[in-house]
Amino acid sequence: MYKSRISGLGHFLPPSSVSNQDLCMLMDTSDEWIQERTGIKSRRWVDSNNITSSSQMGYQASLKAIENSGINKSDIDHILFATISPDHYFPGNGVLVQDLLGLDTIGATDIRNACSGFIYALSVANAYVQTGQYENILVIGSELQSPVLDKTTNGRDLSVIFGDGAGAAIISRSNNTSEIFSTHLHSEGKNALELSMKGPSAIHWVDKLERNQISPENFAPQMNGTLVFKNAIVRFEQVINEALNKNKMSSRDIGCLIPHQANLRISQFVQKKLGLRDNQVFNNIQKYGNTTGASIPIALSEAVEQGHVKRGDIVCLAAFGAGFTWGSALLRY
Ligand code: UT7
């Protein structure tokens, strides 16, 4: 077995920042409510006059990750793209980035595990590198969510939370002490529809909407926020402890926890349960909102850029979201 590591990171955020005050012009909400319940002050939403795509944002993040890893792009031998907001119904975004990077005929895989998507992709990349099948894998998490959000008062519980953005990592064979120690994945399909967007899909198709056979809510994300919140705080703690126990570590060993940026209150609750100090947890939801599959690679990339995570630090990544799916990864950066 080989060891794998994160050799480079990059992220891309659309320039257009939308404050809580801006949202008050669109719906009945307030800066106070949003900050108190979620911690969010602003989010990035792509400019509707200059719309981009999740593959384009993923491509931009990938260019930075490749540059930071020190490898040549031609060294990449596989792509894993995690998104729930792909450019097309099919094909997936992985092949679009493969083409944008001009990477000949290497394989590309898409992963649709929402907020846990990046951890699931990292887990697959880790296994591929460990078995020797590939040496440098590009893993992307990218989401373009703002166009499908219901920005009226009706959809305010969801639309104030979510943002757009992309992050990417290069997972390489490791010849030094940097190492992904383990990954841990879980799901609970009985709650699949508690956080979901049903259409457009093969059974929720546009003509059914036009013939009034299904309602427009099927084409917007729906969330049982309280249930998601209650499950998230339990599963985050469980799956982080699972990673620590597997590697005979305790929460004191964590240099930096990067939780999926779902809600600042969830991160703070998990921090408290694990007894972590403020400087052991990195949050940037205040600026970017919840970017689903992109939130962990954006946060990790930013934590490295700002010096919160350095080479040799023990880092724990953890996510919970639609599916329900959840997971963690423990690594030495
Ligand atoms: O990343 C994927 C996983 N997602 C998550 O982890 C999200 C988990 N859930 C949450 O973060 C929270 O449940 C929310 C932030 C979505 C909602 O916060 P909450 O504290 O659970 O509020 P609530 O849904 O219980 O609503 C409380 C009140 C309601 O009014 P009434 O019925 O008490 O009069 C809502 O209508 O707040 C109202 N409300 C709002 N008010 C102002 C809901 N959204 C808003 C809003 N602005 N944007």
Image (tube, grey):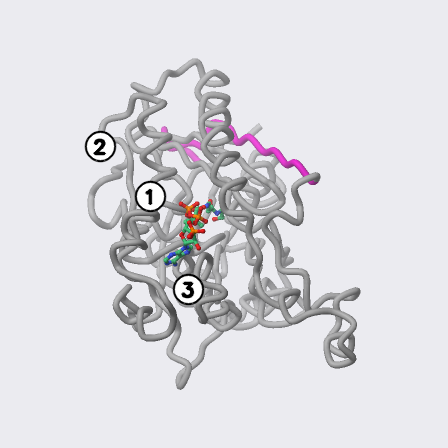
**SS type, badge 2:** helix
Pick the residue in front: 321 or 127.
321
Pick the residue in front: 296 or 130.
296
Circle 2 is placed at which residue position? 278
Residue 130, picture quadrant: top right
Q: Is residue 68 left or right of residue 148?
A: left
Pick the residue in front: 79 or 239.
239
Disc assigned to residue 264: 1
Boundaries of the magenta span: 174-189
Residue 300, picture quadrant: top left
Marks 3 and 1: CB-CB under 8 Å? Answer: no
Residue 3, above or below 141: above
Three-letter amino acid code of the residue under disc 3: Asp
* Cα–Cα gap, marks 3 and 1: 17 Å
Give the x, y percent position of residue 187: 63, 36
Give the x, y percent position of residue 179: 42, 31
Say whether residue 90 is visible: no
Give the x, y percent position of residue 80: 57, 53
The residue shown at (56%, 64%) is 85
Q: Residues within 10 Å of mark 3 (few under 14, many from 20)?
A: many
Three-letter amino acid code of the residue under disc 1: Leu
The residue shown at (58%, 54%) is 78
Q: How crowded is mark 2: few (under 14 residues within 10 Å), some or many (20 or more)?
A: few
Ligand 1 under 8 Å from disc 3 Cβ = no
Of badges 3 and 1, nearer the viewer stands: 1
The residue shown at (38%, 38%) is 266
Marks 1 and 2: CB-CB under 8 Å? Answer: no
Q: Does the magenta stretch include residue 32?
A: no
Ligand 1 under 8 Å from disc 1 Cβ = no
Pick the residue in front: 297 or 126.
297
Circle 3 is placed at which residue position? 164
